[in-house]
């Protein structure tokens, strides 16, 4: 006869430091430790601590929370963080990851107006991937929409599966904004899927980053597929808690997101018994 067992994959569940905004990077480490996250992903942005490797190492050591990933400064508001040269940004992100013991650098496709960077992006990411054990995981983005008009803001493409990359990040808030099928995208990424940004969305033109389970994305189904396939990358809770009315409400949202993730990463299987 067979008996049901629960198989929990090797994937670690991390908290993105962006999930506590407008609170600080330091607050993210504190919350991650208190709630029992396996680590953090550092979003490098205008907070000086997020840019300071020594400060991040001290926070990691003090709270006992490892840095599992570094998100390179690819946002509009971080265009001057760690240089205005996008390749320097990636080199510094790799250096930070190596020194902090993180396995992954998350990077967005270039903006279309970064023409030279966009032309060399695919080849350049491959070149950098050959120079380090750190994974450069290119993230899916989305078209920008205003009313009924759509603007393609990223090049070579907002959908990285249309190009050849060694590793991918899938973001389920971005699949919602792009209005594409998250499970299909995960399937296209296949064994090159190295990293997950877990959040939810309802298909709004605004990138919502809802707590998983509060939108229309198949967050549970994606986690269950990862569990069944033995996914050993990182699942990063990257949600928007800006509207939280208090620190306690923010922490409750992040605890709910962690519980949702752990529940659906636990994959039931059957083994032969006596």
Image (cartoon, helix red, strand yellow):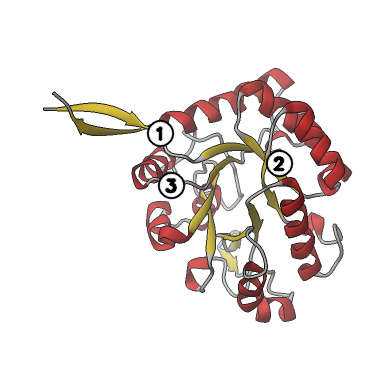
Task: Choose between 243 and 28: the one closer to the eye.
Answer: 28
Chain-order first, disc 2 or disc 3: 2
Residue 250 lies in quadrant: top right
Chain-order first, disc 1 or disc 2: 1
- The circle drawn on residue 193 is none
Q: Image check: 179 left or right of 54?
A: left
Q: Secondary structure at mark 3?
A: loop
Q: Percent from the top left, x then y, of residue 140? A: 55, 59
- Pointer 3 and pointer 1: residues touching (CB < 8 Å)? no
On screen, residue 205 above or below 167: above
- Pointer 2 and pointer 3: residues touching (CB < 8 Å)? no
Q: Secondary structure at mark 2?
A: helix
Residue denoted by label 3: 231
Q: Image check: 59 left or right of 3?
A: right
Chain-order first, disc 3 or disc 1: 1
Does the rendering let one see residue 23? no
Label 1 to label 2: alpha-carbon separation: 26 Å
Task: Choose between 48 and 133: the one closer to the eye.
Answer: 133
Label 2 to label 3: alpha-carbon separation: 24 Å
- The circle drawn on residue 18 is 2
Q: Residue, x 87% and y 64% (percent of image)?
A: 83
Q: Percent from the top left, x then y, of residue 177? A: 54, 53
Q: Residue, x 54% and y 30% (percent of image)?
A: 257
On screen, residue 237 above or below 117: above
Q: Percent from the top left, x then y, of residue 233? A: 51, 48
**Local crowd size for mark 1, using a 10 Å CA cut-off: few (<14), some (14–19), many (≥20):** some
- The circle drawn on residue 8 is 1
**Local crowd size for mark 3, using a 10 Å CA cut-off: few (<14), some (14–19), many (≥20):** many
């Amino acid at each position: 006869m067979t008996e049901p067992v629960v198989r929990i994959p090797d994937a670690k569940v991390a908290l993105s430091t962006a999930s506590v905004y407008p609170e600080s990077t330091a607050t993210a480490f504190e919350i991650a430790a208190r709630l029992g996250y396996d680590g953090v992903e550092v979003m490098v942005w205008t907070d000086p601590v997020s840019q300071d490797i020594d400060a991040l190492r001290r926070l990691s050591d003090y709270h006992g929370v490892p840095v599992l990933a570094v998100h390179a400064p690819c946002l509009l508001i971080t265009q001057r963080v760690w240089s205005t040269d996008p390749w320097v940004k990636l080199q510094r992100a790799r250096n930070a990851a190596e020194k902090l013991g993180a396995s992954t650098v998350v990077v967005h496709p270039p903006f279309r107006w970064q023409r030279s960077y966009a032309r060399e992006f695919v080849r350049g990411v491959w070149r950098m991937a050959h120079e380090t054990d750190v994974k450069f995981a290119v993230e899916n983005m989305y078209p920008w929409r205003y009313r009924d008009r759509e603007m393609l803001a990223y090049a070579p493409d907002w959908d990285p599966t249309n190009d050849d990359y060694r590793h991918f990040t899938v973001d389920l808030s971005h699949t919602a904004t792009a209005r594409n099928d998250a499970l299909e995208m995960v399937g296209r990424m296949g064994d090159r899927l190295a990293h997950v940004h877990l959040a939810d969305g309802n298909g709004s033109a605004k990138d919502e980053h809802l707590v998983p389970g509060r939108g229309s994305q198949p967050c549970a189904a994606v986690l269950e597929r990862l569990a069944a396939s033995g996914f050993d990358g990182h699942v990063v809770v990257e949600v928007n808690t800006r509207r939280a009315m208090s620190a306690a409400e923010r922490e409750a949202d992040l605890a709910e997101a962690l519980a949702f993730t752990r529940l659906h990463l636990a994959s039931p299987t059957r083994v032969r018994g006596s």
